[in-house]
Amino acid sequence: MRYLGTFLIIALLSFGAYADEPVELTILHMNDIHSHLLPYPYAEGEARIGGIAKAAGLINEIRGNGENVLVLNAGDQWAGDLMFGATFDPVEAPIVGFADFVVTNMMGFDAFALGNHEFDLGPDMLYAVLSHEQISDNLPPILGANFENLEDHPGLASIVRPDTIIERGGLSIGIIGFITEETNSNAFPAPLVIDALWEGDLNDPASLQPKETYQTLIDDLRGRGADIVIALTHVGHGGEIALGQLYDGIDIIVGGHSHSAYYNTINGPQGNAIPYVRAGAYTENLGELTVTIENNEVTDHSHVLHNVFESPVEDPTVAATVDNFKQMVEERWPGAYSDVVAEIPFHMDGLGGTDGYVDKKETTLGNLITDATRAKLGTDIAIEASGVIRQSLLEGNTTPGDIYRVLGWGFRPDRGEVGARLVIAEIAGITLAGALEHSASHRGTTNFFQVSGLSFEYDSSIPPDENRVDFQSIRINGEPFQAGALYTVGINEIVTEFGFQLGLLSEGDTTQTPYVQFDVLKEYIDTVDISRYETTEGRIVDTADPTSVPISGKIPSSIDLKQNYPNPFNPATTIRYHLDTYSSVKIEVYNVLGQKVATLVNDDLSAGVHEVTFDSDNVGGTNLSSGVYLYRLTISNDEVGSVSKVRRMVLMK
């Protein structure tokens, strides 16, 4: 008996020593594949990026040569390439995104976090694909922990779960999935609602506070036996950093939504260093994070970013499957991956490009797209939101499939069309000024505009809640814009919808055309001299950039119109202005639709400082509703003729 006791003690000590020994875990990860199953560009001899069969071959190789390998996908499998609609048939197979999840299953991902683009065509389409008999049996855990009301879609509620626990190397690895709340506005999840992951404003990090709901979910994973917790997130760079800083118990973050590759650490609330990785987008890379786990903590880590196209091996089964889907695309859209539309002599950057960012300044690709729209519609100007310009147009022979990748949003299975239709809108000059201010205040986001037939200056050094646009600089086809004039604007139906949401457009202002933007751009590239787009033209000038060239012919202003105070206001605010000389003065207030709601001043005034009060509760006997309003000061005198200046103000009741 004494020997048995000694044996048990030795065994327990040995087990304890084993349990405390470090475990090396390899995490392979991808994000934002966006239907990019083929290597691209697609013309013969041009391919140099990506290839999902190569990614699968690389995963197989690493799995075969190592132990404790985990393979994760951080969402946005859908939308961005014609493969998204490979199996679509309006009668026999009215679903899209089928090819993407067939291949996802074949690659053996251990967990998949939903992205916003999985809801581009609503939750019913997502459920139709995930529940399809050829997909449902082999699905990895589909994660999304921050739905407010997942039970409102019983089908998805039977598939989507907040988290999962996977065993590797004696470790229980908890994985929790999060999705960006931007899904509510940039996709169509209704009736589902995605909850914000924190209290406060992400643009004001000091205001952020964790929500008890999500801390409880993380704690529950630990309580169910998870030794470490991985947050598999489709939230974007700033949000994923906030997650790591706010929530206790997260050991690793594997992210998505932001399309750039990334590897760094985040300081957690307990001072722990949290490895944070993204692989980049469009199947370009496979990330490999190696972590050492000791006593249920990450003690060491390293990261390798594998260039997928350079992988020497393909998974033959995946390759054959992708080739089959390619043939389906070519049958539905002949020449999509083979016909050469034009030779592009230089790289033209899309969203998040390497040489010039379409969400921060004028780009050659933005000029090309908006010029194509204006040429087709014959409008005064054309506007494109940077978020619609998804990818760069790469140097070399370009096919319809390559052009589609540039405008990879807007697939419409209800119409059997591969993109958004163009729309002609008619808006007042004062509304256009407000729209440009919205663009400038959202520099660095998908709401920043690219333009044609239009030029303007803005100052990015001014805080975004103040006026950045110099309204005196706005030119419509070289002529100063008129606040009271009506202008025709070419946009697509995606931008139109955002215009409705922002109150910049109403149904009566717009006319939908039969022209699909993808087709219009393809035709324009086929006929235009692309060499004219090698450099930008000074359509959008950021005066905070010391290299910028001011717009010529700008009218000098001899008036000083101050920002109203307070702003936001309720119900009244004061507008102050300064005149250099005796002038005829008019101050008018407009809503964002360009409708005049009040005239505050219409008089001849002497030089000096003046002010007027605007009372929103006493405008023609009515009370104004909350929203953005524009106030315009116009002066006339012998010195300058007639000049105007516009600012915006916010009524918040």
Image: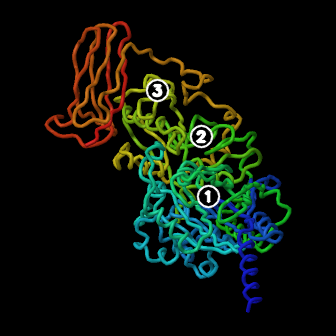
Q: Residues within 10 Å of mark 3 (few under 14, many from 20)?
A: many
- How far is mark 2 from mark 3, CA to CA? 20 Å
Which of pointers 2 and 1 lies earlier in the amino acid sequence? 1
Q: Nearer the viewer, residue 108 or 468?
A: 108
Marks 3 and 1: in contact by CB < 8 Å? Answer: no
For the residue labelled by badge 1, is the local secondary structure a helix, a strand or a loop?
strand
* Residue type indicated by callout 2: Val
Q: Nearer the viewer, residue 263 or 477?
A: 263
Q: Which residue is mark 2?
A: 358
* Residue type indicated by callout 3: Ile
Residue 448 on image: x %, y %: 51, 40
Q: Which residue is mark 3?
A: 474
For the residue labelled by badge 2, is the local secondary structure a helix, a strand or a loop?
loop
Which of pointers 1 and 3 lies earlier in the amino acid sequence? 1
Residue sitting at x 46%, y 26%: 474
In the drawing, does residue 195 fall left or right of residue 521?
Answer: left
Q: Which residue is mark 1?
A: 253
Name the quadrant containing residue 74.
bottom right
- How far is mark 2 from mark 1, CA to CA? 28 Å
For the residue labelled by badge 3, is the local secondary structure a helix, a strand or a loop?
strand
- Quadrant where the image shows the C terminus: top left
Q: Nearer the viewer, residue 232 or 572?
A: 232
- Quadrant where the image shows the N terminus: bottom right
In the drawing, does residue 604 fall left or right of residue 488?
Answer: left
